Amino acid sequence: MVTIKELPKEEYLLKGHAACAGCGPSIAIRLLFKALGNQVIMVVPACCTTVIQGPYPYTSFAVPLQNILFESTAAAASGIVAALHQRKIEDLTVVGWAGDGGTVDIGIQALSGAAERETDFIYICYDNEAYGNTGMQRSGATPYGAWTTTTTAGKKERKKDMPLIMAAHRIPYVATACPSYPIDFVNKLRKAKETKGTKYIHILAPCPTGWRYDTSKTVEMGRLAVQTGLWALYEIEYGKFKLNPPSDRLTDKTKRKPVKDYLTLQGRFRQLSEEDIEKTQKWVDEDWIRYQKLAAIEGTIF
Amino acid sequence: MAQTIIDTANHIAGYAAKAARAKVVAVYPITPQTTVVEKIAEFVDSGKMDAEYICVESEHSAMVACIAAASAGVRTFTATSAHGLALMHEALHWAAGSRLPIVMVVVNRAMGAPWSIWPDFSDSLSQRDTGWIQFYCADNQEVFDTVIQAYKLCEDEQVFLPAMICLEGFILSHTYMPVKLPNQEEIDAFLPPYKSGWILDVNNPYSHSNLVSPEWYMEFRYMIHEAMENAKKLIPQIDKAYGKHFGFEYGGLIEKYKCDDADLVLLSMGTIGGEAKLTVEKLRKEGLKVGSARVRVFRPFPVEEIRKLAAETQMIATIDRHVSFGMEGFLATEVKASVFHEKDSPLVAGFVAGLGGRDVTAQTIEKIAEKSLKWLRMGKVEKETEWVDLRE
């Protein structure tokens, strides 16, 4: 377990990148390199990071980066892993880095295939709960009630539970994270790096541009997501489910902040009725009953 | 030791991938391509071929995995047909745009709806503008030879483009023919280890294929166009060098048969070009000056060779196993475009034949020749596009 003081000083996300002010994903990219160093090959599909890296002939990434088609992150990673294996290169980490649309919607097929093939790579979904790069359209990861440009009255359906879908592939490592908890994220990345096979990390990455909150509040927004229990930090190692701090202390409902505290700070939830908020609270409480049950299972959950 | 084996074009394509020492093979099954990838699986599983074999979950992923593996520094191979190729379409652009020397065998099959598993060129010709070099083969030997030639071409620094080697489903894919396989040392001497224009490298980190503004995009496109022009020059050279090494040569971009004094040239692609030779033999015996030319490389299109051909003949009849709905077959269009500025350009008649696997026999081609000769005598093509053997 690393502490904040032990994080390396080197920066491989360079200054001058093109992320929005207050961008949650860009904090996560910085942490990604703190955890993995620069012996990394990145695969990035169409997503905000297409922009964050900057246009030709510049780049803000000090690692080799393969831009690839929207639905293809995991397929590209498969090709790179295979090529490195043929070249007998063993000390590089292949990282797929994709947004929520590129993961839970258009990229789910390639991801599922790569996971089933036990491809040795880390896949990270940075989830800002909408198609951010195209201007905030609804994705399968957009939560109930959220405004997007294609759900102008609020989304009518619930968010897809992608980490558990990945866990059902029986891959060796699945984890959730949030850049507001940097040490937790870094430790999970390091664990993923040491694990052979497909590793899936799903990050909730707050987005002031799309979520409609002040750019100074990104870290706070991530914390609130965790403190309210809307986003739980957990890991599933070889099928064993475990809640991580601080989420492991939130199984008691009274320890969790009401979801209202989180929802009312964001413009995208402005149109939510009291009834909608209650509904969301009920779902979160149900989720936590499920997390407790999963954590109580002695063996593997799948 | 060189050896002659009797096998199907699909299996031969597998032998070619092995001989070329492809290191990553990413594939998804589709009729009639399947026996290509089955053969390679057999080679890899038995240790006869040292390659990573990725059973991807779609053709789209097959092409992307090849793109990424080529980016990571190894020679790649894949194969597909029809709908698989169509599903790859987006990735085909990405492969060419990334300037990666990927080689793919396309076992031609008609596009649905309605379902068809039989051959025509509607699948590969729909990919005309993706930046891929396109070869069309007339027999199994040519399939083997062209795969090897294609790697040599694509990995030339003047080219760095991907290529598809097209062969008609069933007519070639499942038909046994004798094929001479050179020994591995000879292949290795002809085809050196993998070379590409760039590689994903932690010691020299770049963002590859990131956003390009309008200030630069056109230049990147022009470079692909130039590479195609370079390929046009290199293909005949490579074909000749290959012939010198291995004894098989295909005329470079166009294979001509008795065209020198021909009044009429039957211009086609793939196996129709092979069959047309029989027609030419027969008509020659009857005293008719007919020749056959087979466009072996459709992209880059052999404009200069077509012009040469046009200058030496009075009429070209194109036989397309393809149609662009609302227009005509691509071969007809490309030939007309090629000769448009020529003085005394010949008559050009377009024939659409053999769609969805309908037989195009020597007799079918004879009918095409007879109709063309009639129009030639009249000095006028009566019908711009004739659908051959169409039920009324």
Image (tube, rainbow, N blue to C red):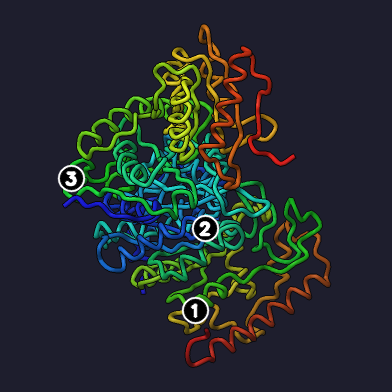
Specify whether B124 is left or right of A133.
left
- Looking at the rendered structure, the kind of residue marked 1 is Asn
Separation of residues labelled 3 and 2 (CA atoms):
33 Å
Report helix, strand or loop for mark 3.
helix
- Looking at the rendered structure, the kind of residue marked 2 is Thr
Considering only vertical position in the picture, is A7 above or below B300?
A: below
Q: Mark 3 = which residue?
A: B186
Going from N to C along the chain, the mark reached first, 3 or 2, is: 2
Q: Quadrant of residue A38?
A: bottom left
Q: What residue is at 65 percent from the left and 56 percent from the top?
A: A130
Position of residue B83 measured from the top left corner of the image (x, y, whole percent)? 57, 52
Separation of residues labelled 1 and 3 (CA atoms):
60 Å
Position of residue A165 measured from the top left corner of the image (x, y, whole percent)? 57, 73
Separation of residues labelled 2 and 1 (CA atoms):
49 Å
Are dots 3 and 2 in contact, CB under 8 Å? Answer: no
- Quick check: do tags 2 and 1 share a chain? no
Name the mark on residue B31. Answer: 2
* Disc 2: host chain: B
- Looking at the rendered structure, the kind of residue marked 3 is Glu
Q: Mark 1 = which residue?
A: A244
Q: What residue is at 53 percent from the left and 91 percent from the top?
A: A297
